[in-house]
Image (cartoon, rainbow, N blue to C red):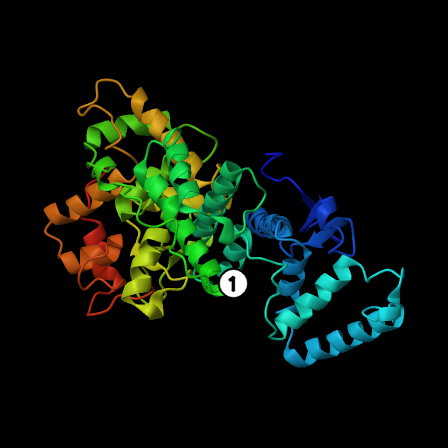
Amino acid sequence: MATLDKYLKLKGKNKDLYFIQKRIPKKLQFIFSYDVMNRSLETSDIRVARQRRDEILLGLEQLEDRLIQGEFDIMLNKFEQLDKETLDHVRDRFVDQLSSEYAWYGHPEQGDNPDPPEEDMAMLDAMNTALGSERPEKYPYTLTTCMEANFTYRPDYVNSTLLAHRKAVSRFNEFMGTEDIKVRDIKRKHVRNFKKHLETFIKSNGTIQRHFSDLSVIWQFGRDEEELTIGNPFEKHRIKVSATRKSYLAWHPDDLRKVIPELTSKHFDPLWVYIAWYTGSRLGEVFSIRPDDIYQDDESKVWVVSIKPDREELDYISKLDASAKTENARRIVPVHDDLYDPLMEFKQSNIGWDRPTSQSYSKMFGRKKFLIKDPVNTPSIRYVFHSIRKNTATNFDRAGVEERLAARLVGHSTVGATMTYGYYSEGDDFKTALETINKLPTL
């Protein structure tokens, strides 16, 4: 619990508001006007406080990452957020200040008088660049520079995508033995050797291909900014992904029932399995659910759960329906009769999930499945948590549920299933959907 609530303090007049108290890293203190952050999170809900704290910590981490780019890019990012009139005024005042302090700069009579400090010149260069001047060649684009700049142009990136890009960049820089390699210095031979390096400790070609895809996108951004004419060194490396992928198999219910007792913890450990069974949710979708996402529909009086799509589903609907591609898009699924009591307990407890990430649950599930005795089907990598989703789809099919409605409930990317996020169309109301959900067999 101490780690879970790290940096959180109950303060306020009635000791009913959470604050985040954290010392600012030394390398960031020049950006802030204080050494210790003592900020109200404006909530008395511990779950909300944890979420807001994590967002702040992520922001500090991203700021530290940007420091690798150097002061020029930090200042450029700051100045680009100002409107042109304000920035013109700031620049004029700064130039006047430099001129008064270093009146001799650039004149033949300068002699031994010092030049303005490098950080001052970097600030002026950043202002000029933000106002439309060409980026000076002495500030070349690096892999991290391009990654961070690309993020600003891709607000649709979800957190898992941001983390994947950061990991790929970190691993490539580490392989190259540099804090941050310049885009123009990356050669195809470097990338070929990087691929061989990854193969020594990453067994999944899919993971390696993901690194290459992410790095390719980042490098392409840098190529466009630098106006390079060379080919993308991260493309066309013949990484055979399909050879390492096998489809997941649906669980035999008896085997899954034997896994559930192994999932012991403080709160709600078996619940996430039941949610998946009765909604077809992916792991990330299950842990997007908060107590407030469980509510009674005003019109139909049906209890429903609102499920936020994970990255896989977001990528699909982004291509299919631009109007539904926001991160906050959700599908709403009626609560199965057998899921009602545990979900009500979860809602009323207001505790939330035990583990910090869905990945930690995935790893635990992967370990526990090998503990079951006398399984009907021998546990393997083809039987995972995601397999439960296949069970749900199969159970709908066996119950004779129309594919269109089943796809809407499970969130499948099938023809005609553009996902009715928030509402059911074409005559499907919550009562009809509840009847459909209750056709799923009891786990």
| Left or right of residue 154: residue 127 | right
| Left or right of residue 129: residue 413 | left
> Observer-nearest residue: 233 or 11?
233
The image quadrant of residue 298 is bottom left
- Say which residue appears at 46% left-offset and 49% top-offset: 165
Q: Where is residue 233 in the image (x, y as percent from the top left)?
A: 39, 50
Secondary structure, mark 1, is helix
> Observer-nearest residue: 30 or 178?
178
Q: Of all residues shown, which one is farthest toward the top? A: 373
Q: Where is residue 10 in the image (x, y as percent from the top left)?
A: 69, 46
Which quadrant of the rendered structure holds the N terminus? top right
Which quadrant of the rendered structure holds the C terminus? top left
In the image, residue 251 sits, relative to residue 70, either above or below, namely: above
Please name the amino acid that badge 1 sits on: Thr
| Left or right of residue 115: residue 256 | left
Q: Where is residue 348 in the image (x, y as percent from the top left)?
A: 47, 47
- Please tell me how crowded label 1 is: few (under 14), some (14-19), or many (20+) other residues with Cα within 10 Å: few
Query: Which residue is denoted by mark 1 in the rendering?
Result: 152
> Observer-nearest residue: 5 or 195?
195
Q: Of all residues shown, which one is farthest toward the bottom? A: 85
Q: How many marks?
A: 1
